[in-house]
Image: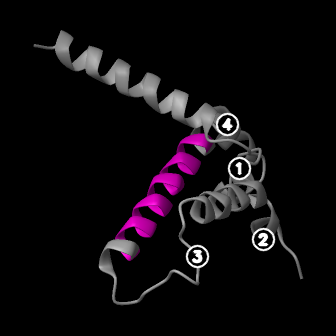
Amino acid sequence: MSTERDNHFQNFAKLLWEELIEKGYTWENYDPDNNLYRDSVVELIAQRAYDLSVHNFMHVGPAEQAEYGDPCDCVSHVPDLTTWDDVSAYIADYDRLKMKHSTQGE
């Protein structure tokens, strides 16, 4: 049986898969004794999980959370992530604002 959780972020999963393949992280290249390989894959997945989280917060705010209640209901209203570009731009803007505010407090 297919559920919202199984299907909602299919494009995110495809983007991540394509990026892993593009960077050469394939089953054929996997070596369980190569910690650098494993660490590189883990780092990439962690970065993209962070990007997905930012994407989610960009699309689900307090008003939506109040309207839908349960977090799983909120997530079902977040559109799938189809490119990394919007998230990267948002993170870059956030980082610039954060730096600006930290230097103003000095």
Q: Residue at x 65, y 39 (%)?
A: 60
Kind of residue sitting beneath label 3: Thr
Q: Secondary structure at mark 3?
A: loop
Comes first in the chain, label 2 or label 1: 2
Disc nearest the viewer among 1 and 3? 3
Image quadrant of residue 6? bottom right
Q: CA distance from mark 1 to mark 3?
A: 34 Å
Which residue has dot 3 on it?
26
- Quadrant of image for the C terminus: top left
Image quadrant of residue 71? bottom right
Q: CA distance from mark 2 to mark 1?
A: 16 Å
Q: Which residues are magenta?
A: 38-55
Q: Nearer the viewer, residue 10 or 43?
A: 43
Image x and y of residue 82, in percent: 74, 45
Is 97 situated left or right of 75 in this image? left
* 101 shown above or below 7: above
Q: Residue at x 21, y 20 (%)?
A: 102
Q: Secondary structure at mark 2?
A: helix
Which residue has dot 2 on it?
6
Disc nearest the viewer among 2 and 1? 2
Comes first in the chain, label 4 or label 1: 4
Q: Residue at x 70, y 38 (%)?
A: 64
Which residue has dot 1 on it?
74
Is 20 situated left or right of 102 in this image? right
Comes first in the chain, label 1 or label 3: 3
